[in-house]
Image (cartoon, rainbow, N blue to C red):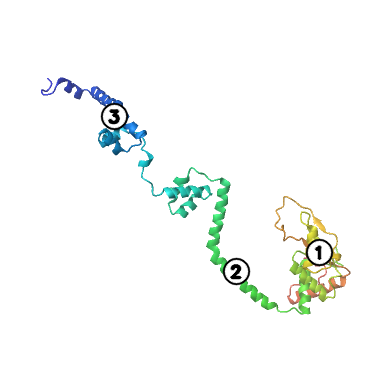
Amino acid sequence: MPPTGLPLHGRFLRRDPFRRRLSYTRTNVRSVTDPLAAEARRLRVVEQLSVRAIQARTGLGRNRVYALLRGVPPPEWTRRPNAKDDLRAEALALRAEGLSVNAIAEQLGVAKSTAYQWVRHLPLDPDDAAERRRARSKVMTDARWAAHREAQNAAMAAERARGAEVVGSLGERDTLLLGAAIYWCEGGKSKPWRQQDRLQFINSDPGLLALFLRFLGACGVGPDAPSYRVSIHESADAEAAVRWWAATLRLPPERFGRTALKRHNPTTVRRNTGADYHGCLVITVPRSRALYWRIEGMIAELFRIGDVRGPGLAGHNP
């Protein structure tokens, strides 16, 4: 027998889950179709009222109004301003200028994750990003090695000054020995299969060429005696190079012969290009066999003093 004190239909609803779910469903349907819900939504969407204003207008409680407005976004004017809205706008502007997430975070003083969330919808161009990474890497490297490079430059300047003090003035003997050593390093020499009957010196360093010309002067050979020829790549300005060598070493332009052009190879990566490239200068001294023999004698004596070779250089093969 059912317990007394409860109506039959009440006991039936408590014991039947299906009937209980049905009663809840009917309650929810009434909430959605309630005319107050439509009015609350209209006040929210059309008149852009706040929850408190809707409460005052409809006489409903706060929780009831929130339930009726579930899924309806609040008006913009009711949103509280974010303290970082200005920073977000500035981050977007910096991103448009091409700054990375790390750079934006560092400049604005925010976390990298925050900066990423603000600008992740604005990807960077891969080439620009790579260029910025290289530039940043260079800046960081320069900053890291600045003190070391400064100390190294100071040490280099001091050693150069010490070296310059050793030189002093060049006498005739110094010039002859220096010129002979320079020629033996860079000039044409006799071989067992080919005898050298004249001096021929080629180099691209104007300082070394000037020392060799001074050596020739000490040997009685003036600048009007040798012939000069520029050897340069065909992609360079040959005429400008001739003028440059003549002006730099104060040589008579009429003594310059036809320029030797080197064939340009596009596949070769050359560093000697640009406005500072002037090719090589070839200095040929005619009727200088005796002077060549004299250079051989000086070099042989230097080798003897240095105990490197015997007194003769016949058949020398460097």
For the N terminus, the quadrant is top left
Residue at 47% over, 50% down: 90
The residue most toward the right is 287
- Locate residue 316: give its quadrant: bottom right
> Eyeballing the image, is 238 above or below 83?
below
Label placed on residue 239: none
Q: Is residue 110 left or right of residue 230?
A: left
Callout 2, which amino acid? Answer: Asn
Q: Position of residue 20 (x, y in %)?
A: 23, 24
The residue most toward the left is 4
> Eyeballing the image, is 77 above or below 283?
above
Residue at 82% over, 58% down: 260
* Number of dots carrying numbers: 3
Q: Earlier in the sequence, mark 2 or mark 3?
A: 3
Q: Is residue 201 left or right of residue 5?
A: right
Secondary structure under tag 1 reads: strand
Q: Position of residue 311 (x, y in %)?
A: 80, 75
Label placed on residue 282: 1
Label placed on residue 153: 2
Q: Is residue 126 left or right of residue 84?
A: right
Q: Position of residue 42 (x, y in %)?
A: 34, 31
Label placed on residue 36: 3
